[in-house]
Image (cartoon, rainbow, N blue to C red):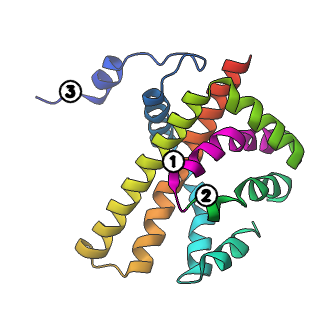
Amino acid sequence: MTLPCAAVAESRPAALPPAERTVGQVVAESIRFYGDHFWKVLVLGVPFVALDLLSWQEAWWKQVIIGSFWSWRAYIAALVVYLPYPILGVYILPAVVYFALVGLGIPDTVQTDAGVRFAFRRGLELGRADLVHAIGGLATIVLVVGISRLALEVLLNTQGGQARLIAVVLADLVLSPLFYVGAVLLAVDQKARVE
């Protein structure tokens, strides 16, 4: 027996307030928000598509340079936060810890149009509010998006008969916005924990 959508929505537990939200709820709320606003949020994947197309089969350092040309102050702040990633990204956990400590300031930077110093200060403040929640939340989002992206890429490439580039572009277009939504919700959680 299948339940109508309204019955399923009513059977969901109410979300906890941001200061009390668990990592699982951050992911669930991110997916729910993305699903409810799919076409509006899908646009966030366009920079990844452009990056994929411009840097296809280029060296990692060329990909970083190509990726550095996308939104003024907030992007500059995000780029400065991102600079250590090629070194830290060799081992995913140090990169996740680093981003949990300083990267959560980027959404506030976008909102206030502040600069790099603000992003780092705010990121440290938000990251330290509940470091375990920040690391766990970001790690979970990275795992969900990364594994889903890989599965979709393989599915599109092998079963859909798409060329690998097309599979990568479609997977990034559809799944990268979930990372943004999850990171912003995590920053909201951390902001509520600070306040």
**Label disc, if present, on residue 88 of the rendered structure:** 2
The answer to if 91 sits in the magenta stretch is yes
Give the quarter of the figure containing the N terminus: top left
**Label 3 to label 2: alpha-carbon separation:** 46 Å
Closer to the chain start, of discs 1 and 2, is 2
Closer to the chain start, of discs 1 and 3, is 3
Q: Is 11 situated left or right of 185 in this image?
A: left
**Label 1 to label 2: alpha-carbon separation:** 22 Å
Which stretch is magenta? 90-111
- The rendered magenta stretch, by its main secondary structure, is classed as helix
Residue type beneath disc 3: Leu
**Label disc, if present, on residue 3 of the rendered structure:** 3
Eyeballing the image, is 91 above or below 109?
Answer: below
Residue located beneath label 1 in the image = 178
Helix, strand or loop for disc 3: loop
Depth check: give the residue in front, 70 or 36.
70
Q: Quadrant of residue 88?
A: bottom right
